Image: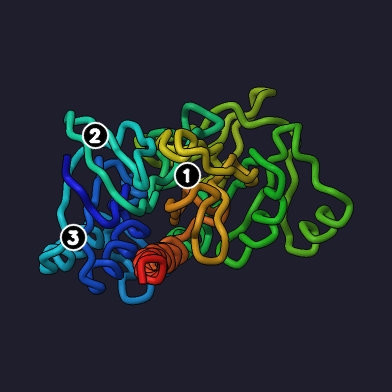
Amino acid sequence: MDQYEVIVVGGSFAGLSAAMQLARARRRLLVVDAGRPRNRFAPTSHGFLGQDGVPPADIMREGLTQLSRYPTVDFIHAEAASAGREDDGLVLALSDGAEVRTRKLILATGVKDALPLDSMVPRWGVSVLHCPYCHGYEVRDRRFAVIANAPGAAHQAVILPDWGPTTFYTQGVFEPSGEEAGLLAARGVGIERTPVTELLGEGSEIRALRLADGREVSAEVVFTAPSTRMASPLAEQLGCAFADGMTGPYIEVDSMQQTSAPGVFAAGDAATSMYNATLASAAGVMAGVAAHRALVLDAAHGALRHA
């Protein structure tokens, strides 16, 4: 069984950022990645300083190229199927049948999205979007629809008119409060209470929305909040505490990305309710630094005990 000082599970922005800190600290580490990042549906990444307009796959490919220059880093293309504790370390079973052992573990495993309408799925990341800061500029001046799927959807509708004319669809469930209704009116946002049942248009494009009463309403871009769940069972298997986010649970971490499970850190979309490439990368940096710090302190305390 291979032994590492740190294993990073997940090879997207958070995981690779964590691995870079540890590689530069000359620690022996393994990056395990199954090749299914959440951002694979988006053609380009935006708002990420120095990487604006670059496809996410290209950013990750360059990150892997840079990491491969460090001699203490190993890579495995596989899924981390299960995790448990053994003595003073952690053991991961991989989908290729291998088992690997580590002293510290960083979970950058991400989340999976569930969209409220089936007709959103082929348009996800192109004309059905979740973040105006990530994608709003590229779809500016088109007709926007915010289809509510979670509390706080009205806030998104208040923000969006900076990019284009907006209508808020409550789906008959997420009625705006009096204060929210006032803000929507002040921003020129229309409110429609009849639920949207289908998006209409060719391929990944949207030309209209079909409502429950049979009407077709013109729209070109939909913003919505997907429901999210953990993309990996590892955090639950290791006993990590979870917090409730607006779209689903996420791994609870402290300011150093430490989870409630000893020796386990988490970063990226799995450990936050705010999704953004820059935030994921920054959290990964912190997790990598914190894991290195934990290794150093463990060794120092061990040396003091035996002095």
Which comes before the other along the chain, label 1 or label 3? 3
Q: Which residue is mark 3?
A: 64
- At x 72%, y 39%, the residue is 170
Name which residue type carries label 3: Leu
- At x 55%, y 45%, the residue is 250
Q: Which residue is mark 1?
A: 128
Whether pointer 1 and pointer 2 mark residues with C-beta atoms closer than 8 Å, the reply is: no
- At x 31%, y 46%, the residue is 40
Task: Report whether 67 appears left or right of 304.
Answer: left
Looking at the image, residue 80 lies above or below residue 188: above
Quadrant of the image for the N terminus?
Answer: top left
Q: Position of residue 4 (x, y in %)?
A: 23, 53
Name which residue type carries label 2: Leu
Q: Position of residue 243 (x, y in %)?
A: 63, 45
Of badges 1 and 3, the one in the foreground is 3
Q: Is residue 46 visible?
A: no
